[in-house]
């Protein structure tokens, strides 16, 4: 009734969004209203709103209004490939992103629609959006176009549709894309150099990783350009044991690849996360180096496990004969035994003693032994374990490590430095002088005498100073006798 009035403007836009009646009707799928409006010569079917710069066709495609899309496309003056001004997305892009397969079919029937159009926001194509959002039916429809480029990467990160599907964990779409001979399974993005396999391993998408690794032409060792991390590195770090297993089954896998930032290997991360299953799988490989230390602090997997108290991982590492139980880190010069003693990890200390080549008196950069570290940090129980094994453990040279004779028995003078012996356990009767013991690799002499002299000197100096500052009042002998 309103349209019968001559003074009515059917193409007037609102002031908030700049949208006309046709734009609103197209978005809501009001086909009868759209039909009435399109019969008017004074209604523009391509008018852009002021908020997003979308046409009525773009709004209809976004919301999956197929009947309205058909009506609009029957008009010769309607541009089926007009992109909006905000994100540069065409009606096909909006339909593919929103998952409206019927609208995608209708639009692709028009020859002038470009299936490879990339938007201005991220440079993604309709295929990339469909792959990212998991719309497998739309991916199939788009791949039927001979002029479609299945490897077209976006302009923001350089990721292909396969990368988007793998990253998002859409295994069905990954399978569809891999069936196309032209699809490159090793394409690395331009931002960080990450491949589809890299993303699948990092995010734990086991089904996607399996399909990719079934391809012989897939590289299992692609390191990214940001930190040099491989798919195996991320699978071990993320505790994705299924993906770790699949990767290790590849003969061309490099299990020792360390990242370029901190020099940490897959075994290093599996150890840190205390993932014994992954550690087992890695150690079964003969080419895995169990002694490869990180470049930041020079800590081996064994040193890391000892410090964190991962006794189960420690046992697995020590089962390898080529594991060095005495390798020192580069930061403090501490062995795994020293770290375990310092942290009070008794279970790890006991596990380390299973190896006869463990050295008990190696000193760190501060000239401290595992025993002195345990006592310094108040771990008397661990110190007891160390003390019990100190005189009986066989070194890797076939000799016996023991305390110097002067320190083999307790000395109550150690109480002068504030050290107390333990009495709660008869099996852990620790000499009071142990904290002062510093084994010198070049000498078997103890530094105890010099340390004790220093303590007495300081105490005497304090007493003298107190006497001078606060002199006692004169007291007569008669007063003292009374």
Image (cartoon, helix red, strand yellow):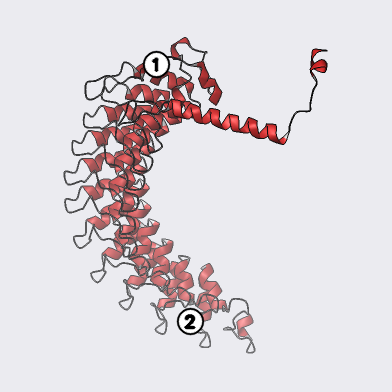
Figure quadrant of residue 20 = bottom right
Q: Residues within 10 Å of mark 1 (few under 14, many from 20)?
A: some
* Residue position for label 2: 45
As displayed, is residue 123 above or below residue 266?
below
**Residue at image point 40% right, 23% down:** 347
As displayed, is residue 222 above or below residue 321?
below
Residue 253, position as x, y percentages in the image: 20, 46
Q: Specify whether 17 is left or right of 472.
A: left
* Residue position for label 1: 408
Which quarter of the rendered picture does the C terminus lie within?
top right
Q: Secondary structure at mark 2?
A: loop
Q: Secondary structure at mark 1?
A: loop
Q: Specify whether 148 is left or right of 336.
A: left
The Cα–Cα distance between marks 1 and 2, rounded to whole angstroms, is 99 Å
As displayed, is residue 377 above or below residue 262?
above
Which one is closest to the eye, mark 1 or mark 2?
1
Which one is nearer the viewer's eye here, 17 or 162?
Answer: 162
Residue 17, position as x, y percentages in the image: 59, 76
Which one is nearer the viewer's eye here, 424 or 124?
Answer: 424
């Amino acid at each position: 009734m309103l349209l019968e009035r001559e003074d009515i403007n059917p193409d007037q836009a609102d002031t908030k969004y700049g949208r006309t009646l046709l734009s609103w009707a197209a978005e809501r799928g009001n086909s009868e209203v759209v039909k009435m409006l399109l019969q008017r010569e004074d209604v523009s079917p391509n008018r852009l709103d002021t908020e997003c710069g979308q046409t009525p066709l773009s709004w209809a495609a976004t919301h999956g209004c197929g009947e309205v899309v058909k009506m609009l496309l029957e008009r010769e003056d309607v541009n089926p490939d007009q992109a909006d001004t905000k994100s540069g997305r065409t009606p096909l892009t909006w339909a593919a992103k929103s998952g409206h397969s019927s609208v995608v079919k209708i639009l692709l029937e028009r020859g002038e629609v470009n299936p490879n159009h990339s938007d201005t926001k991220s440079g993604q194509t309709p295929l990339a959006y469909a792959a990212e959002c998991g719309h497998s039916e739309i991916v199939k429809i788009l791949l039927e176009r001979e002029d479609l480029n299945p490897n077209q990467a976006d302009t923001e990160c350089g990721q292909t549709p396969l990368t988007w599907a793998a990253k998002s964990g859409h295994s069905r779409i990954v399978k569809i894309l891999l069936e196309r001979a032209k699809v490159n399974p090793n394409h690395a993005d331009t931002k960080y150099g990450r491949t589809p396999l890299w993303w699948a391993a990092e995010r734990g998408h086991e089904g996607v990783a399996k399909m990719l690794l079934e391809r012989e032409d897939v590289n299992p060792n692609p390191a990214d350009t940001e930190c040099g991390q491989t798919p195996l590195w991320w699978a071990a770090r993320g505790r994705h044991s299924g993906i770790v297993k699949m990767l290790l089954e590849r003969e061309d896998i490099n299990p020792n690849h360390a990242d370029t930032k901190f020099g940490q290997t897959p075994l290093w991360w599996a150890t840190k996360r205390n993932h014994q299953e992954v550690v087992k799988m890695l150690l079964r490989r003969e080419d895995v180096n169990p002694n490869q230390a990180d470049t930041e602090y020079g800590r081996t997997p064994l040193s890391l496990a000892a410090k964190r108290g991962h006794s189960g991982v420690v046992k697995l590492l020590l089962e390898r004969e080529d594991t060095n139980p005495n390798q020192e880190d580069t930061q403090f010069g501490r062995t795994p035994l020293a770290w375990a003693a310092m942290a009070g990890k008794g279970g790890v200390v006991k596990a380390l003693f299973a190896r006869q080549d463990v050295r008990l008196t190696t000193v760190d950069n501060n000239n401290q032994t595992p025993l002195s570290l345990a006592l310094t940090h108040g771990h008397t129980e661990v110190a007891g374990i160390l003390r019990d094994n100190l005189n009986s453990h066989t070194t890797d040279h076939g000799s016996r490590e023991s305390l110097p004779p002067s320190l083999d028995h307790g000395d109550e003078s150690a109480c002068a430095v504030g050290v107390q012996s333990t009495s709660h356990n008869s099996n852990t009767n620790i000499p009071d002088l142990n904290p002062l013991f510093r084994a010198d690799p070049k000498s078997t002499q103890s530094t105890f005498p010099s340390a004790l002299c220093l303590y007495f000197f300081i105490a005497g100096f304090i007493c003298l100073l107190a006497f001078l500052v606060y002199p006692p009042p004169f007291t007569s002998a008669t007063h003292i006798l009374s």
